[in-house]
Image (tube, coloured by chain):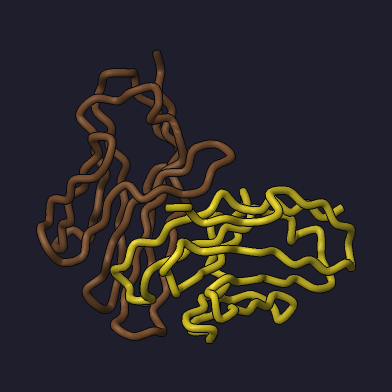
């Protein structure tokens, strides 16, 4: 069975400092992993995805994530936070190779940026 | 290219009523999935449709149902509404229903049950 755990419900950083949002997963198969961002009253937007190619994945807006199989982690990072990064971030796991696959969302991490 | 369109954006219903939500996927996308988002339960998968067939279903009661039309547009229906059904309902479309396919989300329909 697959599952995903976002280790922090809320992260607060100062503008210009690094961002680290943590995600651990469990999966019976080789998973696909995603990070989505949700701004207030908006839908979800894909930041990046891992699908068994390069383990370091670069996404939009300067975000990147590293797939570490030994640690079953897929943490999201950004070198320098911007005020516009304040939002809810969801780590997502998807597995399976048939039409019966489904995706599981983490509980979300709210990122706050201090001026 | 137009994104995923969900209608209506906001809805207020009373307990016991039924409601139908609509989702128009991105042109060319054949997979549509529905999710319920609440503060307490987070984002939960409802069901997935591909080529007019329900391919996967989450752990929701039978009051929640859906369908997909030949043009890939999808509707979700909730009957006998309960207060706990108040949530943001999100629709996502994908080109295929394979697990590594990017899903594009609509802005959601916020349903309030009073």
Residue B50 as seen in the image, left or right of residue A93: right
x, y percent for residue A70:
14, 62
Chain B representation colour: yellow
Q: Quadrant of residue B101?
A: bottom left
- Say above or below: B93 vs A13: below
Give the brown chain's letter: A
On the image, the x and y values in percent for residue A83 come to 39, 22
Q: Quadrant of residue A8?
A: top left
**Residue A58 drawn at (x, y percent):** 18, 46
**For this view, does A53 lie left or right of residue B101?**
left
- In x, y percent, where is residue A92? 37, 59
Q: Residue at x 33, y 85 (%)?
A: A98
**Numbered-mark total:** 0
Q: Observer-nearest residue: B57 or B108?
A: B108
Q: At x 32% / y 18%, what residue is drawn?
A: A15
Q: Is residue A101 positioned above or below A103 on the image? A: below
Q: In terms of depth relative to the viewer, which is nearer, A8 or A102?
A: A102
| Position of A11 relative to A45 (above/below) | above
Residue drawn at x 31%, y 57% as measured from the top left? A34
Between A37 and B95, the residue placed more toward the observer is: B95
Q: Residue at x 24, y 53 (%)?
A: A74
């Amino acid at each position: 069975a697959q599952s995903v755990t976002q280790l922090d419900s809320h992260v607060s950083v100062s503008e210009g400092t690094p961002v680290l949002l943590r995600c651990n997963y469990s999966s019976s198969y080789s998973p696909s992993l995603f990070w989505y961002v949700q701004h207030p009253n908006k839908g979800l937007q894909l930041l990046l995805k891992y699908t068994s190619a390069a383990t370091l994945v670069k996404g939009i807006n300067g975000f990147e994530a590293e797939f570490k199989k030994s640690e079953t982690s897929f943490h999201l990072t950004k070198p320098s936070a911007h005020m516009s990064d304040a939002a809810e971030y969801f780590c997502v796991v998807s597995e399976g190779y048939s039409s019966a696959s489904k995706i599981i969302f983490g509980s979300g991490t709210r990122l706050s940026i201090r001026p | 290219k137009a994104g995923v369109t969900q209608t209506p954006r906001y809805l207020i219903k009373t307990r016991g009523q039924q409601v139908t939500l609509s989702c128009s996927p991105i042109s060319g996308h054949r997979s549509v999935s529905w999710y319920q988002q609440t503060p307490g339960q987070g984002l939960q998968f409802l069901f997935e449709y591909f080529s007019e067939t329900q391919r996967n279903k989450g752990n929701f009661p039978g009051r929640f149902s859906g369908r997909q039309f030949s043009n890939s547009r999808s509707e979700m229906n909730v009957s006998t509404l309960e207060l706990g059904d108040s949530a943001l309902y999100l629709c996502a479309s994908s080109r295929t229903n394979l697990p590594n396919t990017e899903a594009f989300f609509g802005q959601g329909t916020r349903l309030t049950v009073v």
